[in-house]
Amino acid sequence: MFVAAAESAALWRCKSCGKEVSNRWHHFHSHTAQRSICPYCPATYSRIDTLRAHLRLKHAALLLKH
């Protein structure tokens, strides 16, 4: 799914979309159908860690009530 980018040894080019990325694991999840859904708003994320960051930033007051 990835090939080494010619411009930098630290970057990889995605064969699916052509984007150059430094973290293949994180980018791979952007191409999967599985989504993590916010329980408080319509936001969805391809990675659970991104959802957790969203919850801490956007819904901190709601999290403190639990």
Image (tube, rainbow, N blue to C red):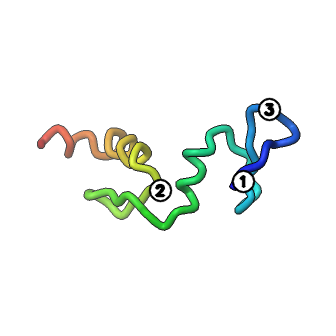
Label 2–label 1 contact, CB within 8 A: no
Q: Pointer 2: what residue?
A: 46
Q: CA distance from mark 1 to mark 3?
A: 14 Å
**Image disc number at residue 52:** none
Residue 4: quarter of image: top right
Residue 9: x and y in percent read 80, 32
Q: Nearer the viewer, residue 26 or 42?
A: 26
Nearer the observer: mark 2 or 1; the answer is 1
In the displayed orientation, state which residue is furthest to the bottom. 33
Q: CA distance from mark 2 to mark 1?
A: 16 Å
Label 1–label 3 contact, CB within 8 A: no
Q: Pointer 1: what residue?
A: 14
Q: Residues within 10 Å of mark 3 (few under 14, many from 20)?
A: few
Q: Amino acid at mark 1?
A: Cys
Give the residue drawn at x 69%, y 56%: 1
Residue 3: x and y in percent read 77, 48
Q: Pointer 3: what residue?
A: 9
Q: CA distance from mark 2 to mark 3?
A: 26 Å
- Of the numbered discs 1 and 3, the one sitting upstream in the chain is 3
- Of the numbered discs 2 and 1, the one sitting upstream in the chain is 1
Give the residue drawn at x 56%, y 45%: 25
Give the residue drawn at x 60%, y 49%: 27
SS of the residue under disc 2: loop
- Of the numbered discs 2 and 3, the one sitting upstream in the chain is 3
In the displayed orientation, state which residue is furthest to the left. 66
Q: Nearer the viewer, residue 56 or 14?
A: 14
